Image: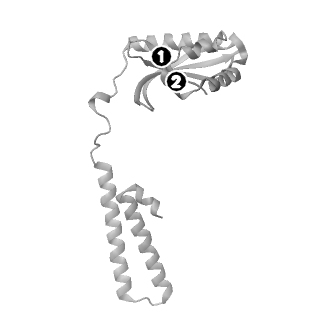
Amino acid sequence: MFQYLAYGLIGFSAILATLTFRLLREELRRKPSARKTALTAIYVYMAFALALCTVGFVYEMWKPVQGVVSTEQSFIPPSPEDFARARETAESFAALLDAGKWPEAYSATSDIFKSLVPRAMWDNMTLQYRGYGGLVKRQLVRTDPGRIMVPGGPVDVIGVVFQCVYESKPLGNEIITVKKGDSGRHEVVGFNVM
């Protein structure tokens, strides 16, 4: 029950309301005609717990967000040039995979990608998925700006989503996540097959 304290005032109020309910239930089980003063005290306590819960809920809904995102870390929408360069980077990365140049594709990824996906895992992933050789055709579905959390903090990215087709049958989607590097060069930070 005490794990609910992690929810703050709302969790504390929920614990109080639960304890009140248990007191009320025990008092009503004890005698068919429960003691009037005990019941009154329990009802007052329950009203207090519910009022506390309401105050906690209202506070949580309208409290100001402090220190979550500074102006230096706020999301900056990508420019149309960034979308175009992210698409080119994703297409180049996919072309390396299609050509069976998996080591080169891995080398072309960012340090963030390499820290999250060890080389052995990468080799296993590409061997499983790329069994079709260069026969998979892809069509651009969309490009989505966003932010991902990595060990060094939040990173603004563009997700390039392709639909993969083999012999006119859709296989699923590839999502190649690209970020603008410090030098202005775009780098792959994520690769996912859905």
Res. 49 image quadrant: bottom left
Tell me which numbered mark, 1 or 2, is placed earlier along the sequence.
2
Residue type marked 1: Glu
Q: Residue at x 32, y 50 (%)?
A: 61
Report the coloring of the rendering: one colour
Residue at mark 1 to residue at mark 2: CA–CA distance: 9 Å
Q: Is mark 1 on a helix, strand or loop?
A: strand
Q: Residue at x 61, y 10 (%)?
A: 96
Task: Give the x, y percent position of residue 107.
Answer: 56, 15
Where is 24 relative to 32, above or below? above
| 6 displayed left or right of 29 | left
- CB within 8 Å, label 1 to label 2: yes
Q: Nearer the viewer, residue 17 or 189?
A: 189
Is disc 1 surrounded by few (<14), some (14 to 19) or many (20+) residues within 10 Å? many
Please name the residue that numbered disc 2 is placed on.
113
| 71 displayed left or right of 158 | left
Task: Give the x, y percent position of residue 116.
Answer: 53, 28
Res. 97 image quadrant: top right
Please name the residue that numbered disc 1 is placed on.
187
Is disc 2 surrounded by few (<14), some (14 to 19) or many (20+) residues within 10 Å? some
Which of the image's four quarters has the C terminus? top right
Q: Is mark 2 on a helix, strand or loop?
A: helix
Task: Give the x, y percent position of residue 33.
Answer: 45, 90
Q: On residue 18, which mark appears?
A: none
Where is 60 relative to 94, above or below? below
Res. 53 image quadrant: bottom left
